[in-house]
Image: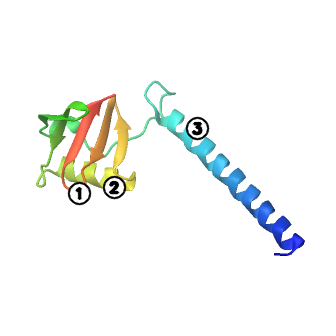
Amino acid sequence: MTEETKILTDDLIDFCNALEASVIKLRSQIQRLYSPGSSPGLQREWSWNPERIIWELSEGWKGTYQKTEELTNPEFQAMLTDLAAHQNKLSRDGYFYWTFQNGTTVGRKKT
């Protein structure tokens, strides 16, 4: 590798690192905007209501949690779609939600 190639490669790596840091900071700022207790009008509008989903208590190796698999419930389907758009994990109103590996079961636990 020539000296010029090494310098260019180092510059590209520095650029990628700076870009990644900027994206992380922007994501953090966006999450603050939509978090509970933020300014009115900036809170996220949800397409599903967790109170309209039947949850059953379960026990895992990290403790108790609730889970559901109401495939015919439109609220469940909207939640599943929302989870898929957020890499199968999200936090909402004091709960952490995740999709199990089977893709049809959702768990939630108070944060």
How many marks the image carries: the answer is 3
In which quadrant of the rendered view does residue 81 lie? bottom left
- Furthest toward the front, the residue is 1
In which quadrant of the rendered view does residue 8 lie? bottom right
- Residue 35, percent across and down? 46, 32
Q: Are marks 1 and 2 in contact (CB under 8 Å)?
A: no
Identify the element where label 3 is drawn. helix
| Front label number (3 vs 1) | 1
Q: Quadrant of the C terminus?
A: top left
Q: Earlier in the sequence, mark 1 or mark 2?
A: 2
Q: Are marks 2 and 3 in contact (CB under 8 Å)?
A: no
| Residue named by callout 3 | 29
Amino acid bearing label 2: Ala
| Residue named by callout 1 | 103
Residue at horizontal 77%, vertical 66%?
Answer: 9
Residue at horizontal 48%, vertical 28%?
Answer: 40
Q: Earlier in the sequence, mark 2 or mark 3?
A: 3
| Residue named by callout 2 | 84
Q: Are marks 3 and 1 in contact (CB under 8 Å)?
A: no
Identify the element where label 2 is drawn. helix
In which quadrant of the rendered view does residue 57 lie? top left
| Front label number (1 vs 2) | 1
- Residue 58, compared with residue 78, is above or below; it is above
- Residue 89, percent across and down? 35, 46
